[in-house]
Image: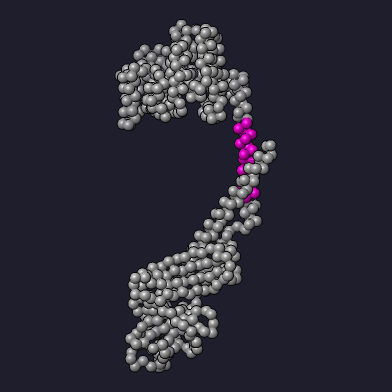
């Protein structure tokens, strides 16, 4: 069964990693295609702007224009000096009057679009061949300067190793259909048949036209941008899924080991009570203690609660641990307790303790046995954990109240219940959290007012108050001024083992 679990985790992780890696690789590839589409559109704009500037630098044409040697040389020099113009000419009524060189052109159709006040773009389709030719024309009176622009092959600017795998299409249209109609221009470079695996469109809007630059490619083209081959994806997925399976095995073994250790500790009474004295603020005498759990391993190692309590609560082990600790506490009473003063011992409980009669029966049996001597048990429930059914919880608590056991609210003001716990659970004492006590003497108006509100509420409600985490004389003096009866904290004592606690007030 365990092997099947590992295999299932390995398979699921392999599929998820494979899909994830492929998705990321495709995403990166598409971003790169987008980058190159924008690069091509910028290059084409540069082609047009540079060529337009060359035409604008030519002198205006007079009415007596002749194709003299000087004019011919001027046109030829323009081609020579320009990066992107391969042929230029002067036209009148579509008749070539003078050209940089003799080029026979059998024009099948011409589509023009105004792109500036003095410039027109034209796409010429030739009868003898499929490729288009891109022209720019500058009007000068009745004449035109015309320049043929070098075709911008995408392969010059983007990595293309495949054949017949991409096309680059440019369309130029009117900015707004409500304006005077302008011809629609469409031209491109290379074409392919088959699946269009990737396409990215860059849009350029000007006052006179709307241009769209679309780079489209098939799977062969997209593969050039992918960083990983399918074999690499499989290998990476296998490695990562294997690591997940190994981690799961490690976690499971650790989980099982921790659970087993806690159960062993419960069985052998390794969860012991530490006692933090609760004192009367007025005279400093110990009146009780909060019982805090520690884990004393068989080898003498003492484990602090933060290393096992959260795990135990999440795994439903805390209840059994509580009973194991209570057994040790009762043994401490029988062996060490000599005080004649009746003290109370507050036991921390969680909502789960109130879901059955087990804790009630346990404490009732202790009372009936006389093992508690002159001492009494109190319950402390934290506000940090929610009680889902307050009505049922109150029914259980009423049983405790009937045998003289009261309930204190720990961490008051810090959690889920708020003062609704006080109203609905029959709480007798509020324990003010250390976070509020720490604000005494500190400029923290919000928490200071909250502290005052808790104390005021307690007095008006007839509740007792215990201040937790008292560490300074300033805090103690403040509590005395506020008539807070009880306190605990490092100013008096840290949590201590049974032998040390029962020496106090002996």
| Foreground residue among 461 and 111 | 111
Q: Is residue 198 magenta?
A: no
Answer with left or right where residue 438 lies relative to residue 369. Answer: left
Residue 114 found in image quarter: bottom left
State left or right for residue 479 relative to residue 305. left
Please state the horizontal and vertical placement of residue 297, each as a whole percent of the image.
60, 22
Q: Image height check: is 263 above or below 133?
A: above
* Span colored in magenta: 237-256
Tell me the quarter of the picture where residue 418 sits: top left
Task: From the viewer's side, name the closer residue of 215 and 478.
Answer: 215
**Residue 244 inside the magenta-drawn segment:** yes
Q: Main secondary structure of the magenta part?
A: helix
Q: Is residue 101 above or below residue 410?
A: below
User: Which scheme is used to colour this image of the protein?
Assistant: one colour
Q: Is residue 174 left or right of residue 312?
A: left
Q: Residue at x 54, y 24 (%)?
A: 318
Q: Residue at x 58, y 58 (%)?
A: 227
Q: Locate residue 164: give its quadrant.
A: bottom right
Does residue 33 appear anywhere in the picture? Answer: yes
């Amino acid at each position: 069964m365990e092997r099947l679990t590992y295999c299932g985790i390995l398979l699921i992780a392999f599929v998820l990693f494979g899909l994830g890696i492929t998705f990321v690789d495709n995403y990166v590839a598409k971003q790169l295609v987008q980058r190159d589409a924008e690069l091509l559109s910028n290059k084409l704009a540069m082609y047009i702007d540079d060529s337009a500037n060359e035409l604008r630098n030519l002198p205006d044409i007079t009415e007596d224009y002749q194709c003299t040697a000087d004019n011919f040389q001027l046109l030829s020099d323009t081609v020579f000096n320009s990066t992107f113009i391969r042929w230029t000419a002067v036209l009148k009524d579509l008749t070539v009057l003078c050209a940089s060189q003799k080029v026979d052109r059998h024009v099948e159709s011409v589509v023009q679009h105004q792109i500036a006040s003095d410039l027109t773009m034209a796409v010429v389709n030739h009868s003898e061949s499929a490729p288009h030719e891109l022209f720019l024309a500058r009007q000068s009176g009745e004449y035109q300067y015309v320049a043929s622009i070098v075709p911008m092959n995408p392969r010059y600017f983007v990595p293309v190793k495949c054949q017949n795998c991409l096309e680059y299409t440019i369309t130029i249209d009117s900015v707004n259909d409500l304006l005077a109609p302008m011809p629609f221009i469409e031209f491109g470079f290379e074409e392919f048949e088959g699946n269009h695996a990737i396409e990215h469109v860059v849009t350029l809007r000007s006052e006179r036209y709307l241009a769209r630059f679309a780079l489209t490619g098939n799977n062969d083209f997209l593969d050039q941008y992918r960083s990983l081959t399918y074999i690499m994806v499989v290998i990476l997925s296998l490695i990562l899924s294997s690591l997940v399976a190994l981690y799961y095995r490690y976690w499971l073994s650790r989980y099982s080991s921790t659970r087993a250790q806690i159960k062993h500790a419960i069985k052998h009474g390794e969860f012991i009570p530490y006692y933090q004295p609760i004192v009367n603020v007025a005279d400093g005498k110990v009146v009780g203690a909060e019982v805090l759990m520690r884990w004393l391993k068989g080898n003498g190692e003492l484990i602090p609660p933060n290393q096992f309590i959260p795990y135990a609560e999440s795994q439903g082990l805390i209840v059994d641990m509580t009973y194991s600790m209570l057994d040790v506490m009762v043994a401490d009473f029988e062996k060490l307790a000599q005080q004649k003063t009746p003290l109370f011992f507050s036991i921390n409980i969680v909502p789960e303790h109130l879901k059955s009669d087990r804790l009630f029966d346990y404490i009732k049996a202790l009372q009936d046995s006389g093992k508690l001597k002159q001492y009494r048990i109190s319950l402390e429930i934290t506000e940090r954990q929610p009680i889902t059914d307050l009505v049922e919880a109150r029914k259980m608590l009423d049983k405790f109240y009937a045998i003289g056991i009261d309930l204190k609210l720990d961490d008051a003001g810090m959690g889920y219940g708020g003062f609704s716990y006080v109203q609905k659970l029959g709480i007798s004492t509020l324990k003010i959290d250390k976070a509020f006590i720490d604000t005494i003497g500190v400029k923290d108006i919000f928490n200071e007012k909250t502290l005052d509100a808790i104390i005021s509420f307690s007095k008006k409600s007839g509740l007792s108050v215990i201040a937790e985490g008292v560490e300074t004389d300033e805090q103690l003096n403040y509590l005395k001024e506020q008539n807070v009866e009880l306190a605990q904290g490092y100013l008096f004592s840290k949590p201590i083992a049974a032998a040390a606690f029962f020496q106090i007030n002996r």
